[in-house]
């Protein structure tokens, strides 16, 4: 029996196992999934934990319950991929052979990459990109009554690139609700030019930051952090003072990718022009955050990718030529506080534009506009994630490739 091995049972690995189990079985293939543990986290929920909007324990489910019947699930750290012998080696010494390999090992935090960062870890330097970090921030935010909060992106790319923006908006709302906002300065420190990577959304979201009195330090390439004196230093000599630093540390691909000689300098897997196939080995595919492509690192993107990758893998197995191509379609909710959120929908070529989504002219969601319904849709998305998205189902009216229908092209305006 031929074997498709999937490394990582996070968003991408779970979706692909659910999608492929039936079609592969009928072709005499089996699927083996490996992850280091049995805890699947709903990562978008981490953002809301420090503000008391989600309870940490509600964000974890067992991977083994989310994977379909008929796949073999192994909980063990993967040590190395050995492309020459088409096998993987687990930390306990076991070896598993594959006919096709799908890498879905995501990205993780590397605070040790920045001098000084770990010296103030969980004292005056926090993160919320892990459940532990988000939980530790609950108490810290509750006791923070005055001073400077710096929301800091160490370097790009990071997964969910709008999340730090949401953190700053929610912090503004949280401190206002507590009546201490007047005593707190919020500074948003980013290596890019502003709130987003493209002009229309940067203007809109930049205006929101100004309205909420969030100061912005842009093009800030962090050199080091000094937790004792509360300073973040930029290579160009600028310094930003903080009392509390909430950072998104450097994100990197899995160490195993480096150990296997499959990664770039950030341990992401270089891919061919399809965006999915290893540049070096044609029997190794990559989905999601683990890939070194230009697509946004986000769960919504992983979901859209899965619809295309399913076609590519099935064509490979059937010995046919794959016609499907992905356009980097992404959509994201941006919480803005006070029970409102903004929705953006874009791809590699078309930046986020205003309009109605997903039904042209009808919505009910609004693009690049703060609404209550967008916020409720973000909260409802958690149910969609567990019960629909991870099962590998398409979301009604939201195709994998971006559509211009319902969008107002204001790019020339
Ligand atoms: C705070 C936060 C907010 C977010 N908000 C949003 C949002 O609003 N919308 C959105 O679309 N996305 C959001 N995301 C991003 C989204 O969660 C990720 O982009 C998505 O989960 C990536 O899926 P993946 O399959 O590539 O990686 P993951 O889901 O991270 O899975 C990778 C898996 O690989 C496993 N693994 C890695 N190395 C090994 C090894 N050596 N051995 C065994 N197993 C290994 C890990 O244990 C993990 O289970 C957010 C993320 C965070 C942290």
Image (spheres, grey):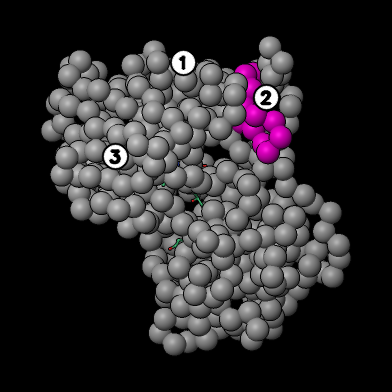
Residue 238 in the image: state x and y as whole percent: 34, 33
* Residue matched to label 1: 207
User: Can you say whether 257 is above or below 383 in the image?
Assistant: below
Q: Left or right of 327: which side holds 129?
A: left
Residue 254, percent across and down?
A: 47, 64
| On-image quarter of the N terminus | bottom right
Q: Residue at x 60, y 73 (%)?
A: 5
Q: Quadrant of residue 357?
A: top right
> Could you give the CA–CA distance between mark 3 and mark 1, rounded to whole angstroms?
25 Å
Residue 380 visible, this angle:
no
| Among the two numbered marks 1 and 2 on one chain, the one whose residue lies closer to the N terminus | 1
Closer to the camera in the image, 19 or 204: 204
Answer left or right for 170 relative to 162.
Answer: left
Q: Which residue is mark 3?
A: 232
Q: Is residue 288 left or right of residue 376?
A: right
Q: CA distance from mark 2 to mark 3?
A: 44 Å
Which quadrant of the structure image shows residue 278? bottom right
Quarter of the figure with the C terminus: top right
Please give the range of residues in magenta.
345-356
Task: Name the residue: 58% across, 81% down.
Answer: 82
Q: How many marks?
A: 3
Residue beneath disc 2: 359
Q: Give the structural element (helix, strand or loop) at label 3.
A: strand
The residues tagged by marks 1 and 2 sit, at their Cα atoms, a distance apart of 27 Å
The label number, if any, that marks residue 309 in the structure image: none
Mark 2 and ligand 1: say if the CB distance to the nearest ligand atom is below 8 Å: no
């Amino acid at each position: 029996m031929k074997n498709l091995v999937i490394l990582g049972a996070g968003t991408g690995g779970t979706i692909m196992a659910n999608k492929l189990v039936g079609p592969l079985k009928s072709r005499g293939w089996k699927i083996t999934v490996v992850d280091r543990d049995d805890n699947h986290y709903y990562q978008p929920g981490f953002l809301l934990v420090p503000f008391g909007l989600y309870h940490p324990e509600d964000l974890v489910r067992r991977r083994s319950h989310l994977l379909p019947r008929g796949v073999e699930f192994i909980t063990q750290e993967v040590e190395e991929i050995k492309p020459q012998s088409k096998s993987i080696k687990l930390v306990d010494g076991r070896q598993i052979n594959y006919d096709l390999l799908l890498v879905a090992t995501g990205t993780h935090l590397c605070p040790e990459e920045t001098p000084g960062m770990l010296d103030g870890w969980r004292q005056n330097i926090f993160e919320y990109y892990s459940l532990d970090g988000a939980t530790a921030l609950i108490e810290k935010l509750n006791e923070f009554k005055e001073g400077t909060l710096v929301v800091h992106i160490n370097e790009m790319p990071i997964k969910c690139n709008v999340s730090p923006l949401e953190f700053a908006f929610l912090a503004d709302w949280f401190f206002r609700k507590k009546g201490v906002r007047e005593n707190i300065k919020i500074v948003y420190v980013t290596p890019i030019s502003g709130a987003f990577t493209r002009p229309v959304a940067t203007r809109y979201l930049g205006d929101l930051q100004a309205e909420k009195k969030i100061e912005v330090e842009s093009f800030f390439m962090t050199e080091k952090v000094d937790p004792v004196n509360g300073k973040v230093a930029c290579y160009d000599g600028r310094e930003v003072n903080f009392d509390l630093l909430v950072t998104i540390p450097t994100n990197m691909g899995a160490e195993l990718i480096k150990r296997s000689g499959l990664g770039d300098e950030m341990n992401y897997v270089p891919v061919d022009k399809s965006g999915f196939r290893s540049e070096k080995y044609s029997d190794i595919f990559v989905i999601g955050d683990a890939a070194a492509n230009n697509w946004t690192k986000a769960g919504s993107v992983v979901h859209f990718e899965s619809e295309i990758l399913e076609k590519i893998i099935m064509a490979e197995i059937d010995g046919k030529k794959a016609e499907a191509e992905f356009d980097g379609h992404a959509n994201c909710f941006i919480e803005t506080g006070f029970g409102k959120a903004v929705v953006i929908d874009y791809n590699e070529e078309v930046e986020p534009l205003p309009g109605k989504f997903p039904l042209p002219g009808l919505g009910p969601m609004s693009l690049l506009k703060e609404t209550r319904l967008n916020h409720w849709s973000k909260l409802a998305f958690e149910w969609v994630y567990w019960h629909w998205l991870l099962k590998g189902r398409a979301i009604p009216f939201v195709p994998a490739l971006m559509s211009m229908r319902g969008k107002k092209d204001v790019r020339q305006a």
